Image (cartoon, rainbow, N blue to C red):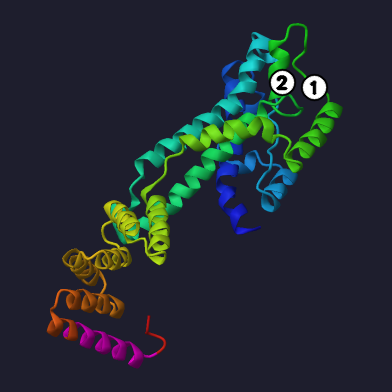
Amino acid sequence: MTGENLLFLPGLVVGLTVHECAHAWAAWKLGDGLARANGRLSLNPFRHLSFWGTLAILILPFGWAKPVPVNLYNFRHPKRDFLLTSLAGPAANLALAAICVGLMHLMLHPCRHGALAQPAMMLANILLSLTAIINVMLAVLNLLPIPPLDGSKIWPCLIPGMKPSGSKRFNQLGMIVLAVLLFTHSGGVVIGPVLDLAMSAIPTDDSVLVSRFERDGAKHLGNKDYAAADEDFTQALALCAKQPGNLCSRSQARLALGRSEEALADIDHAIDCSPKPEFYEQKANCLQALGRDEEAAEARGTVHQLNNRLSTQPASTAK
């Protein structure tokens, strides 16, 4: 299993489990207790995952679960209740996707919670976004009128004269058609627009924006577009103030723009966060630009002291 598949795994397993449990719950509430009697009214994924479907999950970023057994004759209104039971799975996936997006809105500012909490919140945002995307895909995919997907049961309930049931032969044929659609990406015609809509609803957290501003700022700094670099690093620091590297980069841009006092203030803040030799070198440049040569010499002396200290540390402890 690749690292990418591993990130998809939690959302896919949760999505399949919630999907099948929703079918079982809806059938039970509408009068058919067969799924409940078979232990399918559960959020335990092991009660829903099939052998081949689980194997596919471990190899591909896709898989399937065991279908929930339904007895139409237990429903008070067979066609209507079978329709509602079939719709329950995709509806649960959409509800789960909405919950994930809601939780992401509560964690839009990981940079405000300190260096220790930030990595965990960033990982949580990634997993939540992938779970939301996967569940939207599951909902849309299951609405396709291809056996054994829910759509093959939903549409017959809406069309007069059709029976809401399918043979095993049609299910096998449908699996072949579905596999062709997935591996040739032909289903993207239907899923693509819905997926784009889902992506637009997923919020972008601060860490993603900070990385984007850092990348653009470094590019502008390398191209000597110092005004643009100053703006990029200013926006990054507005989202996450305690970033010594960004403070140093903005200091370089401002020094090149002739704003030496502001450049010195930035590098002083960077040193307060992390007293690195390269930061003291930048401080010496700022002081020299301000005509404070003695202080610049002191700063360069500190650079030599820090470099000597690092060079004499054992390899196991030097960072």
253 relative to 100, above or below: below
- Extent of the magenta region: 298-314
Q: Which mark is residue 94?
A: none
At a point 33% along the width and 87% down the height, the residue shown is 310
At a point 58% along the width and 40% down the height, the residue shown is 134
Element class at badge 2: helix
Element class at badge 1: loop
At a point 28% along the width and 55% down the height, the residue shown is 234
Q: Which mark is residue 153?
A: 2
Q: Position of residue 196 (x, y in %)?
A: 56, 35
Q: Which mark is residue 166?
A: 1
Residue type marked 2: Lys
Residue 42 appears in view: no
Of 9 and 140, which appears nearest the observer? 140
Q: Is residue 305 left or right of residue 228?
A: left
SS assignment for the magenta stretch, majority: helix
Q: Position of residue 314 (x, y in %)?
A: 38, 91
Residue 309 appears in view: yes
For the residue carrying disc 2, how many other residues have a C-alpha within 10 Å: few (<14), some (14-19), or many (20+)?
many
